Amino acid sequence: MSVQSPVAGVSGSAPTWRQFSFFDVEPVKDAHDLAGSPHIFQNAHEVSTVASSAFGVLVADVHGEWGRVTHMVERRGVLITIGEEDGIRNPLLKVWHLEKTDKNGFPTLLRSLKLHVTNRPHPATTIAVSAALSYLAIGFGDGTVILYRHIDQSIFSGSASLTALPKPRVIHESATEPITALGFKEATEDSPNLHLYIVTTNSVLTYQASGRGSGGTPAVVDEVGAGLGCAVMDWRAKDMLVAREEAIYACGVEGRGASYAFEGHKSSVHTHLNYLVIVSPPISPSGSHASATIRNIAALNGSAANEDVTKVTIFDLENKIVAYSGTFTEGVREIISQWDQVFILSNDGKLSRLREKPTSDKLDMLHRRSLYLLALNLAKTQKLDEASIADIHRQYGDHLYTKGDYDGSMQQYLQTIGNVQPSYVIRKFLDAQRIHNLVTYLQELHSLGVANSDHTTLLLNTYTKLKDVARLDSFIKTESRRTTGEKGDSDKDELPFDLDTAIRVCRQAGYFEHASYLAKRWERHEEYLRIQIEDAGNYKDALAYLRRLGHESAEHNLARYGPQARLRSNQKTAQHHP
């Protein structure tokens, strides 16, 4: 087997997919023989099936002591297998305890029984087990699906009988459509019932396995089916992904959801973390092929090229990007997702490992191409912390600011509040004389309760400079937005700005009405009287205000402002009555 470097482009049939090299590929060697692949995989044609588990990669071969295993699934330390044994016509279901071994060191066999569905035996084609090990579904080549309920209770009941399993129920039959995939949609808060997806060659159905209304006839949710190996549950275990020649379809309980255009034959699909791995069937390299990778192989090998190549593509469906694409000249036998890595077993026994690059490296790739929205989506998918996401918003804002898109850049900078120093943003928009953008930022600082007195001064000065009385009114007369007391209880009103600063700036700018409103609203009696007497000349209002004060406050302020207010009031009255 030979592995080509990740391709630089995707087939022209899917022009909307952006291409990146988010995975590095390397060969996996045997621990005792660095010249070869792991010994267990060297005779790849003898490997019957492979499964990932909490205990590592599980490998079954055709020479197994208990026959040929065709399907394996591990849940909660329990391995469920389906296989075949010489002299037995029906498939065999076996249950093993991986954490307990027998006297020979093998996993303990808990259950073993034949799968009788009809009088004529048919091979099992697919298997699904719920996350809690409560339900087991098995699909067959004759279109039958059987369901075991409460299988965990039976397994852990302590019964020594190898055949002690609940009787399965036939939940679906179709004489013309083989079962090609099964998958459980686990219960959630929004959807408290467990559902089973049933995929045939021609359709996708759902069966409600738990809750009120369970046990009915499976309902068809899509008339598009899939071949064997070409349907798989998505990484959230929410939708069934169906791979067709023309596209990938996501089928939910209510019907078809999103679809992703990606033309070409598919031989199998697999999930790995938040990715979908697609294996394309072998093709002969040709200089006229739609894929640049295949054309490059043909050019490298020249006219002597006669080896078929298999293409492996890794998609991030949510972000609509191709994270890896490469070819394998000996074909692909198994795809294994384990330890946050993808392992590819080729038909010649070689094992390749695809290791995802660090998130920081992936983000750097996106930044170099100015793909900031994609970087933000990727960061959220990778569950980066708030500070890391804010830094992407900052870089995006810088990019838009440099291009002169001040409105767009401000929308990004607003997302950085709490993580980027406000002075970084304020300086930019002061230098650019973008006052309206600056107002937007300063208002948000106050709205979020992170503004200091300098920010309040700047915002109020900006309002007065713009003569924007409406916004000044709205800002000054805003009721308290934070109501947390000393112990976290809601018994203390606080303004979203510094009160002393606001009163001072309004007085200096000549907005005495706004200054007096604040002083009166928040019972700054001395400030209110000073504004009425020294600034606004509202002496009668000042005297009336003094009379309404409580005894202690009135006595203090009357001694200071009373004589002045009475004198000014009398002078003003005399001027009107000569």
Image: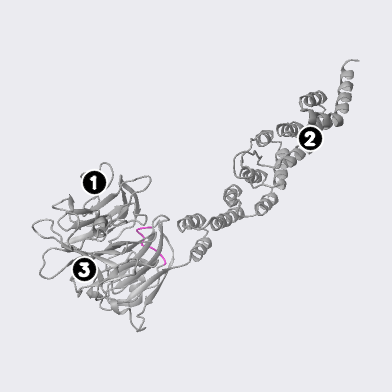
Q: CA distance from mark 3 to mark 2?
A: 87 Å
Q: Main secondary structure of the magenta part?
A: loop
Secondary element under disc 1, as helix, strand or loop, is strand
Q: Name the image quarter holding the N terminus.
A: bottom left
- Vertical relation: 126 (above or below) 38: above
**Label 1, label 3: how many angstroms apart (C-alpha)?**
31 Å
Residue 69's tag is 3
Is residue 13 shown in magenta? yes
Q: Pointer 2: what residue?
A: 527
In the image, residue 139 lies in the stretch drawn in magenta: no
Query: The residue tagged with tag 3: helix, strand or loop?
Result: strand
Q: Position of residue 351 (x, y in %)?
A: 33, 75
* Residue type indicated by callout 1: Val
Between residue 516 and residue 379, name the one nearer to us: 516
Q: Nearer the viewer, residue 98 or 334?
A: 98
Residue 74 is left or right of residue 387, and the answer is: left
First along the sequence among labels 1 and 3 = 3
How many C-alpha atoms fall within 10 Å of the one at disc 1: few (<14), some, or many (≥20)? some
Please, which residue is most extreme toward the right here? Answer: 578
**At label 3, which amino acid type do we have?**
Val
Left or right of residue 19: residue 398: right
- Mark 3, residues whose alpha carbon is within 10 Å: few (<14), some, or many (≥20)? many
Q: How far across and down, in percent of the image, does residue 562 sit?
A: 85, 27
Q: CA distance from mark 1 to mark 2?
A: 74 Å
What's the mark number on residue 220? 1
- Per the rendered image, the range of residues in magenta is 8-14
Q: Are marks 3 and 2 in contact (CB under 8 Å)?
A: no
Left or right of 242 on screen, residue 561: right
Image: 566 above or below 490: above
- In the rendered view, does 377 fall on the left or right side of 177? right
